[in-house]
Image (cartoon, rainbow, N blue to C red):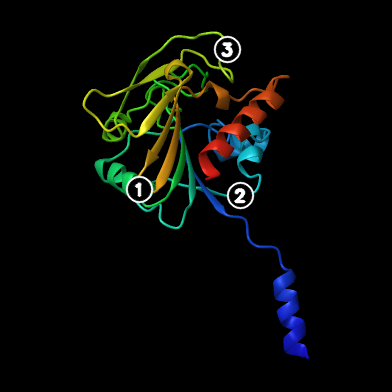
Amino acid sequence: MLAGVLALAACARPAPAPALGLFTSLPILWSEADGVSAQLDAPAKPHWAKAVLEEGHRLVALDTLLHPQGLGDLVIAQPRPLEPAENVALDGWVRGGGHLLLFADPLLTSESHFALGDPRRPADTVLVGPILAHWGLALGEGRESAGTPFPVEAPGELAPLPGGPRDCRIEQAGLIAACHIGKGFVLIVADAALLGPSAGPDVAGRARSLRELMRRAFVH
């Protein structure tokens, strides 16, 4: 009898939320404050995107891409320069069935409290050329145009690399690339302004756009 009750209780427990990896230089999980004391004196409100990323997921902060195993879904947003071994690990993870949402902005326009050269400052540009080239893409400077599905500021432009693989479909005049790579899928956005620390009335719209990008990247 007791064994049956315990079995029923175990079945009634909700399944744990799937892990979602986050690898970023943007202040999504932490505020831009000069040290712990400054954060304690004036704690900042959580970044709006954190709550969206946590919807249906258990958010896992990553400081390296060398060991993405165990993750099914991953968000990389304006990352620091990747090491060669990280490019290899990321490519292998995607080809094995991983789902990636990548924000790669060649000219980040968000303001930062930290000066140029400060390692705490978000990456002003991205150096992801090697992995993009491996997937048959090149990232260059683009131009803003009307009709984009979400806010952009000085966006980049994705284009097929001559002679490269043809695994990606270019959308929105180069703003987005959707790539089926091996058993996995990558959705690339050549801008990161959507993830800016906005506290204005457009936050709800930004949240809807981020949810839609996550749905496209992760639901396969």
From the image, tell me which residue sits under label 1. Answer: 95
Residue 118 bears which disc, if any?
Answer: none
How far apart marks 2 and 3 lie (CA) works out to: 30 Å
Instruction: Residue 8: tell me if it is visible.
Output: yes
Please tell me which residue is depicted at 26% across the width and 46% down the height of the picture. Answer: 85
Q: In 3D space, how far apart are the residues under numbered discs 2 and 1 (Cα atoms)?
A: 22 Å
Q: Are marks 1 and 3 in contact (CB under 8 Å)?
A: no
Task: Give the residue displayed 75% in from the left and 77% down from the top.
Answer: 8
- Compared to 34, does 3 lie above or below? below
Helix, strand or loop at label 1? It is: helix
| Residue type, mark 3 in image | Gly
Give how far across and how far down residue 98 sits, in percent. 43, 48
Q: Residue at x 37, y 24 (%)?
A: 117
Question: What amino acid does circle 2 point to?
Answer: His
Q: Residues within 10 Å of mark 2 (few under 14, many from 20)?
A: some
- Cα separation, mark 1 vs mark 3, equals 33 Å
From the image, tell me which residue sits under label 3.
147
Give residue 2's quadrant in the image. bottom right
Quadrant of image for the N terminus: bottom right
SS label for mark 2: loop
* Residue occupied by mark 2: 57
Q: Is residue 127 left or right of residue 147?
A: left
